[in-house]
C-alpha cells in the first residue's frame, strides 16, 4: 500500500508541475484526453499485471492490439461481417492467443519471454499480411459501435464547458475493479500470488499452478484484445506496421511502476492504474510544457521510471534496515532484562 | 604442547540467530598436524563454529587466534587466504564444470591477463589430485563423479590454496565404505604433511580411528574434551548426550490399527531399478533411515505425487489411488512436510495465515471467493494447537525462527486432518525446544490414529520416535527393524547396504548411553 502512496505522490507532482507551467493543462479538453488515454492504456496494464504477478511476462500485447485493431475494421468494412460476429471473432482470437501462450509455457515449459517475443513478431506479421499492409479504418460508418470508445458521458451536465467522463475510463475502472476483486478476494487470485512467489511451494500445497498460470495469460491477451478494439474504435485508423507499437512496454512499465515485481508474487491493481496514469501524465507534460522535447519523450519516460524503481528499492532497503535494528534492540532489551533478574 | 602457541585457537565464541543461541562461549585449540574431531548432537553448534572459522559468518563475540595472533575472518576469501578451508556438508562444486576448473575456481591462472591458462590448470590440478589419491583426469566434468570423488576434489581444491587448516563437515555422510577408507588415508597423509584437520562427524567409529583429540559440544557450549587415550565410544556418547537418553525411550508403542498406506512395487523416477513395497497402519510412527542420497526424500515425494511414480500400486485406506500430482495425494488424505522447508514448504515472504490457509482454501471457498472468516479461524486454531510464537497471523514467515516456521508447515497440513502424514527431516535446523514439541506432537497425532511416515538423518530421532523403521540404501529398502531390533549399529549396517548381524542387540547402544 505504501508503494501506491509513493507513486500517487509522483503523479500529483507531475500534474502540479504541468499545471503550473502550462495553462492548457487544466482545460476540460486536456483532462478528458488524459483520462481517456489512462482508460485505454490502463486496460492493457491491468492485463499484464496478472502475468507479471505469476513471475512471467507478456511481450506480445502491442502486436495483439495491432492484430485486433486491424482485423476488426478489416472484417467489418472489407468483408461485411456483422458487428457481433466480428467482435466475437477478434475477442475469441485474443483469448485463444493467451491460451496458446499459456499452454506453451505450462505444458511445454517454454520461457514466457521467448513465447511472447515470438508472439510479438508473429501477430504483427500476420496483421500486415492479412491486410496487405494497408491502413484499416471505419471511415464514416459504424458511428454507434465507435461510441464504445469515443463517448463522453455527461456526468456533470451536458454543457460543453463541463467535464465529460470518457467511456474508456469507465470501462477501465470496471475492468480494474473486477481485477482487484479477483486478485484479492478469490482463491484464484490467492493462488497467483502464491505461485508467483514460490511456485514449488504452491505445487507442494496441492495448487494447480499450471491452470492458474494459463488463466493469467488468457486474461492478459484477452484484455489486450479489448484494448486493441477500443484503440481502433477511438482512432478510426490502424496502420498495421506501427499500430500498438511498444504498447506492451508501456503496460509493463506501468505495472512495475505500480508495484509489481518482475520476480512475481506482488502487485496491486490500484498501483498499476496509478502507474499508467503517471506515464500518460508524463507524456502530456512533455506535450504541453516542453513540446520541443518530444523527440526524447522515450528517454524522459525511461528516466522517470528508472528513478521511481530506484527510489522504491532504496525505501525497501531502509525499511529492512530499520526492521533489523528494531529486532536487534528488542533482543538486547530482553537480554538486559534477563541479566537484571 | 611446548611454548609455541597452537596453530589455531578460539576463545569464548558466541553466536546467536533469531530464536536460537547457537554458541555460548565455545573455546578450542588446534595444533599443527593435529586431527581434532568435533562431535556433538545435531544442533550442538558444530556447523556454526566451523562456519565462523571459515569466515562464512562473523561471531557475535569472542576471539580467533591464528599462530597466536588475533585475526578477524571477514569473508570466506579472507579465511582461505589465511589457510583455513571448509569442506561443506553439501559440496560446493560447480558440477557443470570440469575438475580442474573447480580446483582453480576464482583463482584461475591466466595468460596475457585474460585467457585462461588451461595447460597450467590441468598440470597443477593433476598434482593436487595425486596428493589426494584421486585418479581422474582434470578434464572430467564434476557431476559425472561419485559423491566420494567429488569430496576428494574439494580436498584437492583446499590443498591448492595451501590450506593449513582443513575443516571437514560430515565428510563421510554420503560415502561408501571404500570411499571412506580412501578419505581416511588422505587425512593421514595430510596430517603427516603438517596440515591440521578439524573433523566433524556423527560416526564415532571414524572419530576413534582418526582423531588425536576430541572436542565435544552440547547445546552450544563446550561439553568436554578427550585426549587420544580417552577416546572411546562410551566416553564420547556420555559427553555428547549429557543426559539420560532413556527419556525418549519411556513411552508405550502405539497400537497399530488398520493399514492406511499400502505400497506395492513402487518405482520412483530417481531409482527405477528398485521396486519398493511396505505398509503403514493407523496410529503407527514409521521411520525411514538411511544415508544422504539413499532415495528417502524421493520416496516421500513420489508418494505425495510431486514426482510421479514410474510403476507400482498405492492404496490409501484400502482404496487404490493414482498419484500424479500433489492434489491427488492431498485428496486421498495425505500431507507432506518437505525437507526443504523454505523452498517447498512455505511461501516465505507471505504471512502465517496466507501459508496456513493455502492448501485448505478450496475446502472453504464460496463460489471461488476466499472465506476469510474460516481462514482466520483455522489459522488461529493451528497457531494455538501448534504453539506458534508469532506476533500476529499476518507476520511474514521469513522472520519466524526455524522451529516456528516448521510449525506453520505442520499447521497448514493438520488443518486438513490428513490420514497419513509424511515428514521429511521434520526437525532439521530447528532448536532443541521446538524439536521436543514436534516430537510430542507426532506422538499425539499417532495416538489419535494418524499414520506417520518420517524420514530422518538423525539417528537419535529415528531411534526414539519410530515404532518401526525402514532402512534404505541406494534406492532400495534394505531392511525393516522392529523396536527391539532398533539399534544404531543395525541401522548403520542396513544403511550401508550390508545385511543385519543377528547377534547385535538393542542393549549395546542403551548401555553405552547410560554408562
Image (spheres, coloured by chain):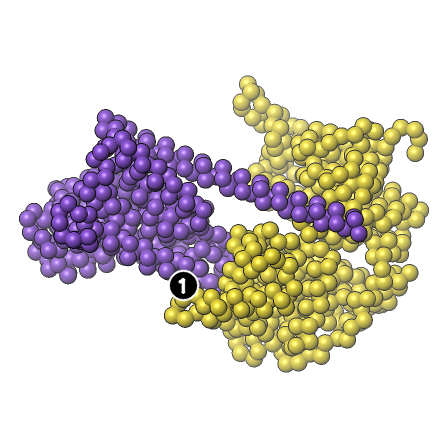
Chain colours: A purple, B yellow
In this view, the residue farthest toward the left is: A140
Q: Position of residue B277 (x, y in %)?
A: 62, 70
Q: Residue at x 23, y 39 (%)?
A: A26
Q: Is residue A50 left or right of residue B262?
A: left
Q: Position of residue B216 (x, y in %)?
A: 83, 48
Q: Residue at x 12, y 42 (%)?
A: A134
Q: Is residue A71 left or right of residue A307?
A: left
Q: From the viewer's side, name the closer residue of A130 and A62.
A: A62
Q: Is residue A250 left or right of residue A206?
A: left
Q: Residue at x 66, y 44 (%)?
A: A329
Q: Quadrant of residue A177?
A: bottom left
Q: From the viewer's side, name the closer residue of B382 and B148.
A: B382
Residue A13 position (above or below residue A230): above
Residue where numbered disc 1 is placed: A186
Q: Chain of mark 1?
A: A
Q: Quadrant of residue A76?
A: bottom left
Q: Residue at x 83, y 32 (%)?
A: B7
Q: Position of residue B18 (x, y in %)?
A: 67, 49
Look at the numbered disc 1 and give the secondary structure of its residue. loop
- Camera sees residue A118: no
Amino acid at each position: 500500500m505504501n508503494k501506491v502512496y509513493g507513486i500517487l505522490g509522483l503523479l500529483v507532482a507531475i500534474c502540479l508541475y504541468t499545471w503550473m507551467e502550462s495553462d492548457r493543462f487544466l482545460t476540460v479538453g486536456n483532462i478528458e484526453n488524459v483520462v481517456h488515454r489512462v482508460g485505454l492504456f490502463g486496460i492493457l496494464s491491468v492485463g499484464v499485471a496478472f502475468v507479471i504477478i505469476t513471475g512471467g511476462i507478456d511481450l506480445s500485447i502491442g502486436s495483439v492490439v495491432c492484430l485486433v485493431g486491424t482485423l476488426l475494421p478489416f472484417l467489418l468494412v472489407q468483408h461485411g461481417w456483422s458487428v457481433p460476429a466480428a467482435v466475437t471473432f477478434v475477442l475469441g482470437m485474443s483469448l485463444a492467443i493467451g491460451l496458446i501462450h499459456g499452454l506453451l509455457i505450462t505444458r511445454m515449459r517454454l520461457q514466457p519471454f521467448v513465447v511472447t517475443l515470438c508472439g510479438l513478431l508473429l501477430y504483427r506479421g500476420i496483421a500486415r499480411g492479412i491486410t496487405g499492409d494497408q491502413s484499416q479504418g471505419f471511415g464514416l460508418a459504424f458511428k454507434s459501435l465507435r461510441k464504445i470508445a469515443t463517448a463522453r458521458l455527461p456526468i456533470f451536465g451536458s454543457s460543453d464547458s463541463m467535464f465529460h467522463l470518457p467511456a474508456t475510463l469507465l470501462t477501465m475502472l470496471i475492468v480494474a475493479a473486477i481485477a482487484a476483486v479477483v486478485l484479492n478476494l478469490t482463491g484464484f487470485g490467492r493462488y497467483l500470488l502464491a505461485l508467483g512467489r514460490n511456485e514449488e511451494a504452491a505445487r507442494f500445497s496441492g495448487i494447480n499452478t499450471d491452470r492458474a498460470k494459463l488463466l493469467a495469460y488468457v486474461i492478459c491477451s484477452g484484455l489486450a484484445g479489448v484494448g486493441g478494439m477500443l484503440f481502433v474504435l477511438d482512432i478510426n485508423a490502424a496502420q498495421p506496421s506501427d499500430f500498438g507499437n511498444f504498447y506492451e512496454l508501456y503496460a509493463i512499465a506501468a505495472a512495475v511502476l505500480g508495484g509489481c515485481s518482475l520476480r512475481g508474487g506482488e502487485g496491486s491493481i490500484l498501483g498499476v492504474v496509478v502507474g499508467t496514469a503517471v506515464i500518460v501524465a508524463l507524456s502530456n507534460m512533455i506535450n504541453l510544457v516542453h513540446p520541443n522535447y518530444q523527440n526524447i519523450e522515450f528517454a524522459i519516460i525511461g528516466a522517470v521510471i528508472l528513478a521511481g524503481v530506484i527510489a522504491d528499492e532504496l525505501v525497501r532497503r531502509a525499511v529492512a534496515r530499520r526492521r533489523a535494528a528494531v529486532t536487534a534492540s528488542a533482543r538486547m532489551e530482553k537480554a538486559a532484562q534477563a541479566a537484571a533478574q | 604442547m611446548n611454548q609455541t602457541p597452537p596453530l589455531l585457537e578460539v576463545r569464548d565464541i558466541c553466536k546467536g540467530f533469531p530464536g536460537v543461541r547457537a554458541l555460548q562461549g565455545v573455546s578450542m585449540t588446534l595444533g599443527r598436524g593435529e586431527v581434532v574431531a568435533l562431535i556433538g548432537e545435531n544442533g550442538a553448534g558444530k556447523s556454526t563454529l566451523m562456519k565462523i572459522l571459515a569466515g562464512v559468518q562473523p561471531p557475535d563475540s569472542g576471539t580467533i587466534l591464528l599462530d597466536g595472533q588475533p585475526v578477524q575472518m571477514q569473508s570466506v576469501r579472507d579465511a582461505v587466504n589465511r589457510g583455513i578451508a571448509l569442506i561443506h556438508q553439501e559440496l560446493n562444486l560447480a558440477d557443470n564444470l570440469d575438475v580442474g576448473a573447480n580446483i582453480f575456481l576464482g583463482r584461475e591462472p591466466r595468460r596475457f591477463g585474460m585467457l585462461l591458462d588451461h595447460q597450467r590448470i590441468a598440470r597443477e590440478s593433476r598434482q593436487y589430485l595425486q596428493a589426494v589419491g584421486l585418479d581422474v583426469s582434470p578434464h572430467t566434468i564434476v557431476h559425472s563423479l561419485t559423491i566420494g570423488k567429488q569430496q576428494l576434489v574439494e580436498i584437492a581444491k583446499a590443498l591448492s590454496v595451501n590450506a593449513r587448516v582443513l575443516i571437514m563437515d560430515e565428510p563421510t555422510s554420503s560415502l561408501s565404505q571404500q570411499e571412506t577408507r580412501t578419505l581416511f588415508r588422505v587425512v593421514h597423509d595430510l596430517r603427516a604433511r603438517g596440515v591440521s584437520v578439524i573433523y566433524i562427524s556423527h560416526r564415532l567409529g571414524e572419530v576413534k580411528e582418526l582423531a588425536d583429540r576430541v572436542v565435544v559440544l552440547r547445546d552450544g557450549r563446550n561439553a568436554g574434551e578427550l585426549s587420544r587415550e580417552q577416546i572411546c565410544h562410551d566416553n564420547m556418547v556420555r559427553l555428547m548426550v549429557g543426559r539420560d537418553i532413556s527419556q525418549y525411550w519411556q513411552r508405550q508403542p502405539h497400537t497399530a490399527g488398520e493399514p492406511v498406506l499400502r505400497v506395492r512395487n513402487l518405482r520412483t523416477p530417481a531409482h527405477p531399478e528398485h521396486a519398493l513395497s511396505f505398509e503403514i497402519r493407523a496410529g503407527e510412527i514409521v521411520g525411514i533411515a538411511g544415508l544422504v542420497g539413499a532415495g528417502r526424500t524421493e520416496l516421500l515425494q513420489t508418494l505425495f505425487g510431486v514426482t510421479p511414480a514410474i510403476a507400482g500400486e498405492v492404496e490409501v485406506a484400502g482404496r487404490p489411488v493414482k498419484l500424479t500430482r500433489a492434489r491427488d495425494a492431498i485428496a486421498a488424505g495425505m500431507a507432506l512436510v518437505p525437507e526443504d522447508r523454505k523452498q517447498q514448504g512455505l511461501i516465505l515472504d507471505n504471512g502465517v495465515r496466507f501459508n496456513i490457509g493455502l492448501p485448505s482454501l478450496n475446502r472453504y471457498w464460496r463460489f471461488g471467493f476466499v472465506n476469510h472468516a474460516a481462514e482466520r479461524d483455522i489459522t488461529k486454531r493451528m497457531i494455538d494447537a501448534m504453539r506458534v510464537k508469532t506476533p500476529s497471523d499476518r507476520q511474514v514467515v521469513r522472520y519466524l525462527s526455524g522451529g516456528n516456521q516448521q510449525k506453520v508447515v505442520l499447521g497448514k497440513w493438520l488443518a486438513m486432518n490428513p490420514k497419513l502424514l509424511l515428514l521429511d527431516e521434520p526437525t532439521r535446523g530447528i532448536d532443541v525446544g521446538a524439536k521436543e514439541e514436534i516430537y510430542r506432537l507426532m506422538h499425539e497425532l499417532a495416538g489419535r490414529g494418524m499414520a506417520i511416515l518420517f524420514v530422518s538423518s538423525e539417528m537419535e530421532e529415528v531411534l526414539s520416535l519410530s515404532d518401526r523403521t525402514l532402512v534404505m540404501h541406494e534406492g532400495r529398502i534394505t531392511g525393516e527393524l522392529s523396536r527391539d531390533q532398533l539399534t544404531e549399529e543395525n541401522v548403520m549396517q542396513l544403511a550401508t547396504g550390508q545385511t543385519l548381524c543377528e547377534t547385535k542387540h538393542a542393549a549395546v547402544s542403551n548401555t553405552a548411553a547410560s554408562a
